[in-house]
Image (tube, rainbow, N blue to C red):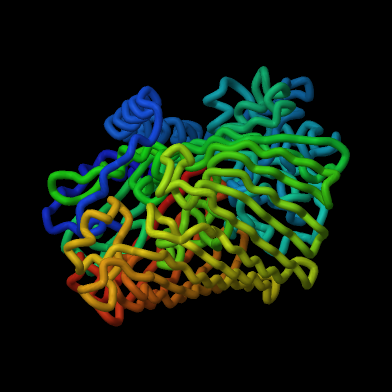
Amino acid sequence: MICAISAVFFSVLLCCKPTGNSKADRVIRKPTGSPAPHAPAERRWLRQGKQQMAALLSNHGRKTAIVLVAVAMMPIRLWGQDVRPTTATDDAASLATQSSVLPKDGTSSPESDSKAAPAATSEAAVEPAADSNTLHGNFFSRFGQAYLQDWRGSESSGPEPKYRGFPAPISNPPFPFTVWPYGGSVTIGYPWTQAGPLMEAIWSGRNGEGWKKSGVQIYGWVNGGFNVSTSSNGRYANAPAAYFVVPNSVQPDQQVLYIERQPDTVQTDHFDWGFRVASLYGIDYRFTTAKGWFSHQLLHTNPDGTIGYPYGYDMVMAYVDLYYPHVAQGLNVRIGRYISLPDIEAQLAPNNYTYSHSLLYSYDAYTQTGINLTFKINNHWLYQIGLSAGNDVAPWVNEPNAKPTLNTCVGYTWRKGEDNIYTCMNSLNSGKYAYNNLQAAYATWYHKFNDSWHMATESWYMYQKNVPNVNNPSAASMLQINANGAVCNSVQQLTCFAPEWAILNYVEKGFSKRNYISIRNEYFDDIRGQRTGFRTRYTENGFTWGHWIGTTVLFRPEIRFEHAYDAPAYSTGTKKSQFVAAGDLIYFF
């Protein structure tokens, strides 16, 4: 029954026709003026190669997603099929492990009943499990069996993996992480407990032992959602809400593939290394795109006035991790493109409590390309410092968009890990108007009330200087595509200072490993309208129920109400309020 519902859902999701564009559609984050001329950003052969790949993925990405769904639906043919017993001599006997939901970027899952990752298991942990839990047969058969064992709760488990630090305050599932998250690094001192059905099928095969020794994993998910909204005027009428910007529709949000190895940061006797390459296809690329990283797909204006392809590809993360255990209590150096350090939420669907995103998260920085150093001073203190090309820009796009940008963060944990404050200056440079050149200061507080209740509160203040005035025709040539201007105090001003601030709170209640609820409330003041395109204050309130099927399927229905106080911002600038009922399904592999 579960598989049949999933199959119908994704058939509709991936085969439905996109809704038509309208000339009245509002462009997300698009300024009212003309885009500034583009300077030569990179070598011609590299630019042409990326454009060809982007076009290929845009034209054929949906077919690729359908193939992924077909593979993910392999358990359908195995549903109800008994798993045959195996003997202790089965090649896979010592390799079967328990599935685990994807961790937050860089976050491990050291909980009292967590599932041991291959690198963290002891000999006892890899002893042959009960015969009925051992995967057998060809690859596709093993792949299907891994899902069935996960859904039945019959998969094997090992002892608690070792860790250095306080016990994990919450559990995953049902929540998206176990240790209070920080960006720009793996979680130093905690093991990597990721173990999805695809890797279980590989580990239990002929070359499984080699894969386990390498530490490399391949995993990901298929994610789609729907919404029913009171807004309908234009293709992206739900904006400024995100990411479900297309109203009254079903959308392929993000289909994601990771190839990853994480360094072992529990041990303290030798250097270790890791890497991650994360690829995303779907409508969500509109929010993750950084200028210079396959950005040709988004940063062009269509004849109807909208920007970009409806769906596209993005390499959201591409980095290496270098772990030095003898510096403080561990130093991790990350080099490449990585998720911006602060925030309760993240771009990748499983890293969030809810389907939709807060306004606070939707309009801050997303990724940075550079180098970031994370020092674990002790169990209480964490320090980070880094240098990047700026927010959502690649170093090779050059000035004025790419420029040396400092980030630094301090984290403090107390009450044996149950409270954490994480403060960041996420980006600091000249602050002059450029592509998403936000100067941003953050503070986040996580607090555990008891075994079932916790909360997360975040606030930021951001600004840009010399932002072109959208009401002054003389400033039109200064505007960049997908980088809003400001609604300055007077028409005569050519540019102005554009600040904004926001505060957000999540309250979470876990009922079991399978069910939780999430209550979200926020206030956002877009003081000059530079982030959302409307000079107004917002409040947003949401309620979500999260339901797990095993650890490989997550369904998150939600309701959300928001209001713009000073200008109509919803339904393409025609309504002050918006109500949305929505939900998404994440199918892990």
Q: Residue furthest right?
A: 269
- Report the number of discs: 0
- Image quarter for residue 154? top right
Toward the top, the furthest residue is 206
Res 412 → quadrant: bottom right
- Which residue occupies the foreground of this view, 433 or 544? 433
- Where does the image place residue 408, in percent across and percent down from the top left? 63, 58
Q: Residue at x 20, y 69 (%)?
A: 471
- Residue at the image position 43 percent from the left and 56 percent from the top: 437
Q: Is residue 587 left or right of residue 325?
A: left
Q: Where residue 126 sits: x, y (%)?
A: 79, 34
Q: Position of residue 453 (x, y in %)?
A: 63, 73
For the point 35% across and 78% down, the residue is 537
Residue furthest out toward the bottom:
565
Residue 560 visible in rendering: yes
Q: Is residue 507 left or right of residue 449?
A: left
Q: Is residue 145 visible?
A: no
Question: Is 295 on the left or on the right of 450, as rendered?
Answer: left
In this rendering, is residue 185 above or below 432? above
Image spot of residue 36 (x, y percent): 26, 48
- Between residue 256 and residue 53, name the one nearer to us: 53
